Amino acid sequence: MNDNDRSADIYDSPLDLNNANDPRTLALRLIAPGKAVLELGPATGRVTRVLSERGCLVVAVERDATMVPTLERYCSRVIVGDVERLSLEEVFGEQRFDVILAGDFLEHLAHPLELLLELKRYLSEEGYVVASIPNIAHGSVRLSLLQGKFEYKDIGILDQTHLRFFTLESILRLFTDAGFAIVDVQRVRQDPFKEPYIDPPQADQPEVRPELKRLIEDDPDAATVQFVVKAFPVNLPAAQLHTLQTLQAQIQEKEKMVLNQEKMLTDMRNTIEERDHTVSSLKDQIQTLQSHIEQADGTLRERESAIRELQTSNEQLTDWLTKYKKAKEKLLPTGSLRDRVARKLAGSLLTKSGPARKPYSETEPDVRR
């Protein structure tokens, strides 16, 4: 529900029925086809259209009169006005509904308890209420309060038109006090350290101390942006209603424990996946190293083979030189006449084989001068 000078268009956004983290999707899953539905605050009619396509007969109550032409395409009747100021008896008379849908609606009311009490009489024998309600205990709000901030926004948990703020406990108490038994609670979850529904990039959040970060991470309600509940009216004495509320609270505590266990399992799976990835990466590195080692071994074997060949050649050359020296010593004993003649002849041959002197040229300086 919106302020008089505020268009319902501000709340419009595409609806993906496959997105299980959208409160509208979760609410629609709680409404069977062909039901008679009273929709409170349908705004631009995204949900209304789906209900109509599924064969539901929809009556809508909307404060923004500019939405009427759109809503009339999907509704059997559109009532314009503030539901808290309307005479419901005059508006609905003997009409009854299988489902009363209050999507992001109760938080806009001055007296949600009184409205729920009044709406009970307009439910059919098997009728129930489906409501999506923002959670003021989301982690982003908690952290904001720790910084001394409580700033209203155009949309989101701190929407400036919200008159009431709820936690899971106060939601359970509200419905119990109104004579309803909540039979289903579902959560829309988002990062508890970021403000939800804000499209522009947010400024860097202040650093959160590890113990505080862990405290928020361990509370499933801190990651819950909205609760989606299904509630049936019950005719019980006050004492039994109080007992019912206690049991509902205990059930939700168990549910939170389950969610914590699921989170632990998810964290463990992620850790295992990271380790598997690390192991796989290490295996690839080992295979690469083994390949390099094998290549190095091949090169080393080739070098060893070349060295052995060189050693063999060196041994052969050494053996040949030894034989040559022995033969030379026999043929040309050192100091003998044959040795002196051979040396003289070798020197003569070396002198004749030297480079020839260039002929004299007038361009060359005359070193004889």
Image: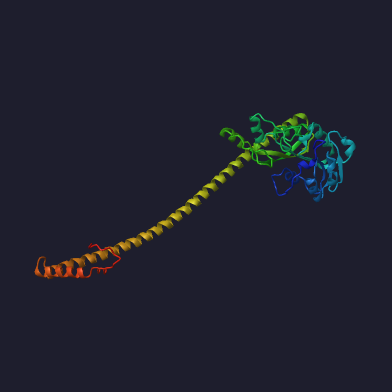
Provide residue 42's location: percent of width, then percent of height. Answer: 80, 42
Q: Which quadrant is home to the N terminus?
A: top right
Provide residue 131's location: percent of width, then percent of height. Answer: 76, 39
Image-quadrant location for residue 115: top right
Provide residue 262's location: percent of width, then percent of height. Answer: 61, 42
Quick check: 105 left or right of 20? Answer: right
Count of numbered badges drawn on the protein: 0
Of residue 22 and residue 129, the one placed in the foreground of this image is: 22
Q: Which residue is drawn at 54% across and 45% down?
A: 271
* Coloration mode: rainbow
Of residue 195 and residue 59, the one placed in the foreground of this image is: 195
Q: Which quadrant is home to the C terminus?
A: bottom left
The answer to whether residue 226 shows anywhere in this view is: yes
Of residue 54 and residue 103, the one placed in the foreground of this image is: 103
Provide residue 184's location: percent of width, then percent of height. Answer: 72, 40
The answer to whether residue 253 shows anywhere in this view is: no
Quick check: 181 left or right of 269? Answer: right
Of residue 362 and residue 159, the one placed in the foreground of this image is: 362
**48 to 310, vertically: above or below:** above
